[in-house]
Image (cartoon, grey):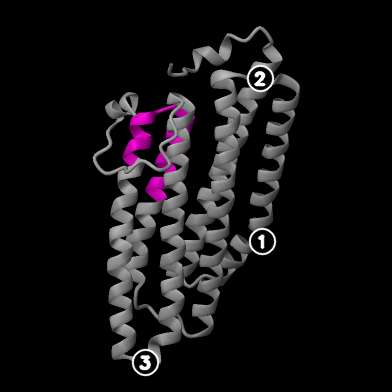
Amino acid sequence: MDITNDRHSQHISRQFNQELDALKTHLLAMGGLVEKQVQDAITSLLEGDSHTAEQVRDNDRAVNDMQLKIDDECTHILARRQPAASDLRLVLAVIRATSDLERIGDEANKIARNALLLLEEGHNMHGFVEVRHISQQVRDMLRNALTAFARFDTRLAVAVLHQDESVDSEYRSAMRSLVTFMMEDPRSISATLNIMWVLRALERIGDHADNLAESVVYLVKGLDIRHVDAKGLEEKDLDKI
């Protein structure tokens, strides 16, 4: 059976209900911070802004601290409340989601580090078009995945799964283009490799956003679709899995 926001207001224990609401709120706050980390990392790269890049690296600890705090909340809820059914799924989905958000934060940190390296080498602009395009796609995926979690929206979650297919295709095309460029101009190898690492980090962010969307489906439908081919999958198909 699908869960709804109403079910979370029907607990005999009002305190338990408040704990579940707080858990979701803290997850979305962590998601907001991670979104900003990704945005700032890309800005630092495209605009050659070393100050913003350093801020991203400094804020990585805050992301890690939020994960630890939320995991501790989940542990206490599991131990004290022994939740069942949809409440248990919520706690487990939050644990999965915080892990993916923390890893997205790590990827943002990698992008910021490569932005600083590119500044040291002269801020080579080749590959920035691909970075700009793919970064916009993965940021949309992350935003949509978090919105899906906030609204228990499986339709939007499935849309994120389809977005990931497009990101993977764009990533492969960009990598082929950059390899060709390095072969034609060996002097560009070092800087181009940094751009390739940035693109790899963006592709991984897309993968983690995809995981977040799968967690939404698990939360709402009770279905584990981590190993289901997303190609052709629609929201109406979830009840058939």
Q: Is residue 173 above or below residue 74?
A: below
Q: Which amino acid lies under the numbered mark 3 shown in the image of this protein?
A: Pro
Q: Position of residue 208 (x, y in %)?
A: 47, 49
Identify which residue is drawn at 44% across, 27% down: 151
Q: Position of residue 109 (x, y in %)?
A: 57, 63
Residue that badge 2 annotates = 18
Identify which residue is drawn at 34% across, 74% down: 127
State which tag comes first along the sequence, 1 or 3.
Answer: 1
Q: Quadrant of residue 10?
A: top right
| Element type at mark 3 | helix
Dots 3 and 2: beta carbons under 8 Å?
Answer: no
Residue sitting nearer the eye, 215 or 61: 215
Foreground disc of the pair 3, 2:
3
Residue that badge 1 annotates = 58
Q: Which amino acid lies under the numbered mark 2 shown in the image of this protein?
A: Gln
| Element type at mark 2 | helix
Q: Quadrant of residue 56?
A: bottom right
Q: Is residue 72 above or below residue 123?
A: above
Q: Quadrant of the C terminus?
A: top left
Residue that badge 3 annotates = 186
Q: Which residues are magenta?
A: 139-159
| Element type at mark 1 | helix
Identify which residue is drawn at 43% across, 29% down: 223
Question: Does 145 appear in magenta?
Answer: yes
Q: Position of residue 19 (x, y in %)?
A: 67, 23
Assess disc 2: are there few (<14), some (14-19) or many (≥20) residues with their C-alpha within 10 Å of its C-alpha.
some
Foreground disc of the pair 2, 1:
2
What secondary structure do most residues of the magenta stretch adopt?
A: helix
State which tag comes first along the sequence, 2 or 1.
Answer: 2
Is residue 7 found left or right of 185 in the rendered image?
right
